[in-house]
Image: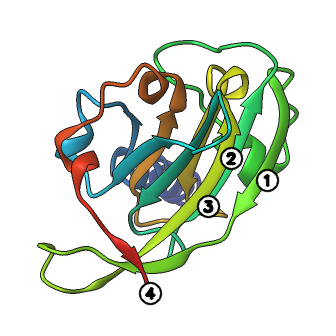
Amino acid sequence: MLIRQTTLIIWILLAFAGAATASWSRFVVITPANETEYPIVVQVEAVPGHEGRSRIRVIGDVGSRQRAWLVVCRTSVNPCGPYFRDMFWFGAENEDVKLWMQLFPEQTLVPGWRGHLYPYVELELPAEQMHRAYIYIDFSHPVDDGGYYYSIDLAYYLKGALGKKGDLKWEAQ
């Protein structure tokens, strides 16, 4: 009887521990409207001489602990933001995804940001793909310490409404 009670107590404690770990994790969809609330800068500009093509730069904590992926879906997905974690962590199938690839960061110096080097990723996409493309930033495997993980819905940036931080000028190092 004592073994059953002890086992039951252990299972209950483990259930609460799992819930506590999960409560530290928060999914955020980055858009021009909320970008200034998070440690990520998204810049989008037209590519000179290439009509309908945009250059996207995302400056943030990409590469040190978290990774960034470009995800292009078959059609535009839920405006509340796609949840790609199962695909990257566990290899789950996602019928909405047409292609995905990991983005590898470089470093940049952002004037006005305490003179530190910040990791960034940069890519170019045609407007047609930006309507259904996302940059997903998350840990590459399950972690216990939680934290934020992000999806940047590039369609919001295609519309030309850049967040305040998106106006910063920067140079690659």
Q: Secondary structure at mark 1?
A: strand
The residue indicated by pointer 2 is 70
Q: Is residue 113 left or right of residue 41?
A: left
**What amino acid type is highlighted by mark number 2?**
Leu
Q: Nearer the viewer, mark 1 or mark 4?
A: 4
Q: Position of residue 101 (x, y in %)?
A: 79, 53
The answer, for residue 139, to whether it is visible in the render is: yes
Q: Secondary structure at mark 4?
A: loop
Label whose residue precedes the other's in the sequence (2 or 1): 2
Which residue occupies 48% across, 38% down?
A: 152
Which residue occupies 40% across, 66% down?
A: 145
Q: Secondary structure at mark 3?
A: loop
Q: Position of residue 19 (x, y in %)?
A: 41, 45
- Distance between the Cα atoms at labels 2 and 1? 5 Å
The answer, for residue 19, to whether it is visible in the render is: no
The residue indicated by pointer 4 is 173
The residue indicated by pointer 1 is 101
Using a 10 Å C-alpha cutoff, classify the residue at mark 2 as few (fewer than 14 neighbours), some (14 to 19) or many (20 or more): some
Q: Is residue 136 left or right of residue 26?
A: right
Q: Nearer the viewer, mark 1 or mark 3?
A: 1
Find out whether the residues at labels 2 and 1 contact each other: C-beta distance under 8 Å: yes
Find out whether the residues at labels 3 and 4 contact each other: C-beta distance under 8 Å: no
Q: Position of residue 79 (x, y in %)?
A: 50, 13
